[in-house]
Amino acid sequence: MTHEGLILSDLARRFSGEAGIGPLGLDIRPGEIVALTGPSGTGKTTVCRMISGLERPDAGEVVLGGRALSALPVQARGVAHMFESYALYSHLSVAQNVAFPLLAPGKPRLGRDALAARVQELLDVAQIGHLGARKPGALSGGQKQRVALCRCLVQDAAVFLLDEPISHLDAKLRNELRGWIRRRQTALGVPTLWSTPDAMEALSVADRVAVMIDGRIAQFAAPEEVYFRPATTEVARLVGDPAMNLVEGRLEARDGGAPGFRGKGIDLALPGDLAARLSGGPRDVVLGLRPSAMSPGGRDASLKVYAWEPFGKHAIITAMLEDTMLRLKTPRLDRFEANQEIGVTIDPAGLVLFDATTRRAL
Amino acid sequence: MSLDLQGVAKSYGDVAAVHALDLHCPTGQMLGLLGPSGCGKSTTLKMIAGIEEVSAGRILFSGREVQALPPGARNIAMVFEDYALYAHLSVFENIAFPLRVRGTPKPEVAGKVGAILKLLRLDGIAGEKVRKLSGGAQQRVSIGRALVRNPEVIVFDEPLSHLDADQKVELRTEIKRLQQLQGLTSILVTHDQTEAIAMCDVIAVMNAGELQQLGSPQELYDRPANTFVAQFIGEPPMNLLAAELAPDGRLTGPDWRLPPAAARAGLTGGPVTAGLRPEALRLLRDETGGDGLAVLAGRVAFREHRGDTDILLVALDAPGPDGAELHVSADVPGPSPLRQGDRVRLGFDGSRLCLFDPVTGRNLQADAPLATEAAA
Amino acid sequence: MTDITPRLGTVAAPPGAGSYHRESRWYPYALIAPTMLTLTVVALVPFLYMGWISLHEARYGQVGAFAGLENYRKLLGDPRFWNSMSVAGLFVAIAVPVEFMLGLIGALVLSQKIRFRSVLIPFLFIPSMMAPIIVGLVWKTMLAGSWGFFSYNILERFGILQGSSVFASPDLALYGLIFVDIWEWTPFMVLTFFAGMQALPANPFWAAQVDGANPVQIFFRLTLPMLAPLLVVIGLIRTIDAFKVYDTIYILTNGGPGITTESPSVLGYKYTFDFWEIGTASALAVVIWLLFFVFCNIFYQIAKRRLNVF
């Protein structure tokens, strides 16, 4: 694991009285975007702060371009850090805020016009070009977030840390900025760490995704891998739109002898390739069922509708399988009433099984 | 209780925040106020709640004028973006607050709050201080505080925007179910179209203080009133392509054409903007095309992984009218083997196409059928 | 750093030892060292020296033989000491609660959208900006017998006082001092509480309005509890400050008439520079320090448990 990008090795941070962070390892190649995702409070922001030097790790090292960073003060690390809390300078205008990092001592001086042009270009992309003269106090949350994003991206940095860069924007803008940031960062050829609590945003924007649970990296892999083969139930619970359903049950031999899954209100044959990988006797397992793997109509399981939400191109049905709440995603747009009984068909292709004790994928 | 806004406007000095707004929300339904930041939705909400005064117009609760009443006299409850809980009080006391300030007798408070705690599955944590709870639990407490005194209208101001994705989905379902089961007339203010579409019966899309469209989620999705609504609803947004409409209904783009169709007959010919949902574009594996199918050719500029679907941003071979590169997004089944730079051909038929006036952006077919009607 | 070198293979040495030690473990301590040193020399050393003196015979600037607790025995046997404690106790017990209430009321008034607020606020700074000696002189004049503006127009007209200064009356002098203290510190309390109220989040107040709470309920159920941390801190500071009151008393009454307004600070001064009992004065200082120490601790514990502050 040696390259010119950013490497975190065995990084750890302890807090008195609560569980700490790490040790965790992560690497981002030049020009690569790695997304760090996980529930809030899991330590994503602390990881960013340890990279930029605002927080000191208790163990481990941050290496950037082959150079250990822990010796360097914050200013000398060449890290552009966008803060989740925006951290805008309230006494400066939007344009001055964005220009600020370029005026820091030791940075090459830009001409007045060049500086203004560079700032304006970014503001225009973020669709706040007309707000350059305003003070942050007069902006909405989404506008402030874009100013913070511009102030980060304007820099000539060796690594970019984007801590929840687009979470407060509307869907259209989020969609546009996601693509734009991605193309820009890839072209710059520097490592970018994109932290977000939204796992789907992580999947769509990153080359690789690190899922962080309780201060540790539970899975670090390509988006497809994280989506189709989540490493633990915790990862499965986070990923997907909506996330994967988890059903507790037992792995038992069925009539034909092949292993099947039996849980409350459900009895399923397992597809050949999955069955072949599972050896040994009966055991407790957790079944991972993707919402799109179930469709209304059929007799694989019987559910009671809890709520129905239509989304224009598909609908999400929340329903109870005995006492487990499941979500189905269906292209059917007809209405389902609360407490209505429905039968479902389960597509065995996308099933995932986890060990009931270790919660790891089998 | 039904809610009506008649010509409601708000201005700060000479700046108009909300232009004459007419809205109607039937009894027991949820009305969404949806729009980008600064569109006037929060101001509208505050006027309904009575926190802001109206500059003009009338607000009616079941036909009764309330715009002159103070917030406490309107029998309305609010759920705030940041929960707005009383941090020094316990879960129980937060929910009991509206009853306590009314001098409700103690046994009655205990009974009512107990029922709410059970309904929202908060009974295990009734004694906890609210600031120690997760965001989702805090927002449930705030909903409990709103429900406990049987308000006539309950107003949700961006209730999910500070929650984690999983809590968001869970609470979204929870709110919708409560609202339906209890028949609550409610208003949801949000910038997130997913939330509005999932939860609301009627949605008012606003932009720059003006109402763009009032309709059911399916109407907004299938029959957007203008290009603003078309691009604001749906993720990724609707693709807009310049085209030429012939009087017989034939539609022609730079390198694609669609034959005449009944839905387009009767419209005046001329330049139009064609709106195409990303999921209406299909990846064509070979050189097929043929009858009734228009083909867009280009290169993958960017692929977003969304789990069971992939979103492809495709740079089209045919440039736009000003010579600039044109992009369309396509929502295709995932995981697709395509990578950046790969050549693709995307096909679409005319069945789910919207046509807009290229100058005003207005939808030219205000009476096109909805997807649900077409299916039936 | 060494433990990861083998696995990474090519971790370059940090550029220049200079930048390395700048970020070492001791760097923060080096930064605060000058301040700590200064504080030690100017605060801790004199304090310890005072404690040492209090255990010795010390008169007329000469520190004599070790005296054990003799100075403390003398102090606690002196009725003037107990008198000073009750003077300070009464002073605190009246002045601080009154300043608190007036401060809260003033802050509530300022929080309304009243006119000329921006003009009014600078005026509120005036009393706390004036040197206490000047405050004393102003009020000495205002309350001086039949020619003082205040005592003539108010006290004499209503027959409360005849012909002499408030500060010459054994019954009224202490209340006069309390009045001046209230005048001096209430505006400060108003400003502090006003700033605290401005910093409270707006949404809970809207929520309470929508929930149907009236302004009185909102004040007692929301404003006060949410301000609690600030109230506790300000209350503590003001209590200690009022207990130590010295300069206004010195200029207005110098502890008189008799010893009716002799606060511990005034008594300490007299022990030292009038009677030259330096040992007893040091013992007094130590006793007061102990008193504050215990008081602050009890206060802190109560605040922590009852109010969920800190």
Image: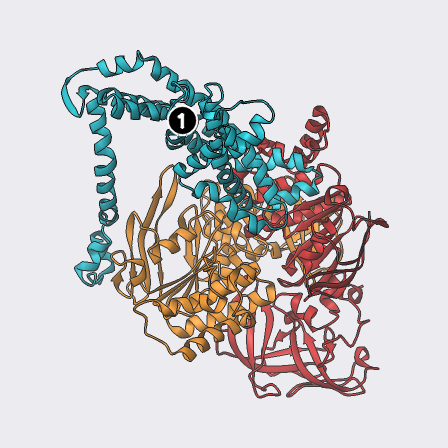
Residue A237 lies left or right of residue A47; in this view the side is: right
Question: Callout 1, which amino acid?
Answer: Thr
Q: Position of residue B185 (x, y in %)?
A: 77, 48
* Residue A126 visible: yes
Q: Colour of chain A?
A: orange
Q: Position of residue A224 (x, y in %)?
A: 49, 62
On screen, C150 above or below B227?
above
Q: Colour of chain C?
A: cyan
Residue A209 lies left or right of residue B251; in this view the side is: left
- Which of these two is toward me, B195 or A145? A145
- Which of these two is toward me, B198 or A133? A133
In the rendered image, what is the letter of the chain coloured red?
B
* Residue B196 visible: no
Residue B333 placement: quadrant: bottom right
Q: Position of residue A257 (x, y in %)?
A: 54, 46
Q: Residue at x 79, y 75 (%)?
A: B365
Residue that badge 1 annotates: C253
Q: Position of residue C240 (x, y in %)?
A: 40, 29
Residue C261 placement: quadrant: top left
Residue B201 placement: quadrant: bottom right
Label 1 marks a residue whose chain is C
- Which of these two is toward me, C101 or B16? C101
On screen, B321 above or below C48?
below
| Quarter of the image with the C terminus of chain C in it | top left
Please, what secondary structure does the residue beneath circle 1 have? Answer: loop
Q: Furthest-top residue in view? A: C77
Residue A163 lies left or right of residue B323; in this view the side is: left
- Which of these two is toward me, A77 or B137? A77
